[in-house]
Amino acid sequence: MSALTLAVVLSLVSAVAYAGGAILQERVAVSTPERRYAPLRRGAWWVAIALNGLGALLHVVALAYGPLSLVQPLGALTIVFALPMAALFVRRKAGATAWRGAIMATVGLAGLLSLTQSADAQSLNDTERVMTALVTAGAVVALMVVAHAVHRHPVVRSVLLASAAGVAFGIASVFTKTVAVDLDANVSLTHQLPALGVIAVLAAAGVLISQASYRGAGLAAPLSTVTVVNPVVAAAVGLTLFGESFRYGTAGIAVALGFGVVAAGGLILLTTERIGAQQAVAASQAPVAKGGPVAADAVAPGMPADGLRADQIRAAGELRAVPSQPATGSHSHRRVLFRHGREHVGS
């Protein structure tokens, strides 16, 4: 097997491992909604962490055998693998809109990454490391604060948290590259300890925040957001600090922007699809009277105005139209039964 073929195989297996970990994280979030960030007592969550770790390891090994322009776009297939795997293993089927959004996000991300070309190996200096770490911390905290502020909108909250997780993962990759370049340059490991600490903190934060992003938002929207934001943030840092650039000059930049629009459109499609699904569920669960809204004076006293069936409303109107009669003789206990209703009215 050639090195290129091995890189492709490792990248595909890595994407499958990431997809399996995401599915388990989403299922844990559904079954334990009170454990937002770290459901430590759930074995399934630890299996998800192991799968994510395996995916990361395979991705790194794939980079050792294949070029970045090939391995990174293949990693974007995670969301494409996740949808059929979720349908097969946990009976979580995705609609046509979710599939279109996932494919758009994957194609856009793959095209964007394929146009990025690496420059000579470079590392961040001490000032750049401190500034990058501080800006990243500020961005992650800001996204989490905004997500908390919009907690009544689960999908928007999820996308914001997934974006925060993607930022943490992307900058962790940047620091990983920095450490790798320095080690190749025989820089002492002691000098790398702060960077290694940043990697550990960002990786842990990304895992915990991504777990919270799956609560109440399904699988596709948060997973696609993390899958896109992670490499885009890393690529943006590479373009600005590592001297990387797009292929084909100005034309490559224009095409890359087009792919970026496609990826963003896919994320928007996934988000709106999930919001629409939640609104449909809420509408189906809300009690609504047939025939439209009912005037307050059309409802008999003591009966709820919401959720009355049409026949109950008609019966209530008929009851109010009957003049009160004194109780006499054998008819002293007259009783009216609401057809298909829930209560009896007696006098």
Image: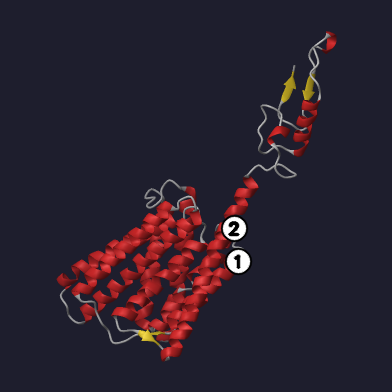
What residue lies at 40% left-to-right and 69% top-to-bottom? Answer: 55
Task: Identify the residue at horizontal 31%, vertical 69% (top origin).
Answer: 172
Q: Which mark is residue 97?
A: 1
Quickly name the residue at label 2: 276
The answer to which of 22 and 198 lies nearer the viewer is: 198
Residue 261 location (% of width, % of height): 50, 76
Asked if the residue under mark 2 is in contact with the one under mark 1, i.e. CB atoms within 8 Å, the reply is yes
**Image position of 345 with respect to 327: above or below:** below
Q: Secondary structure at mark 1?
A: helix
> Of all residues shown, which one is farthest toward the top?
329
- Identified by mark 2, the residue type is Gly
Hey, which quadrant is residue 278 in on the image? bottom right
The quadrant where residue 178 appears: bottom left
Q: Which residue appears farthest toward the bottom when viewing the image?
A: 248
Residue 331's spot in the image, x, y percent?
83, 13
For label 2, the SS is: helix
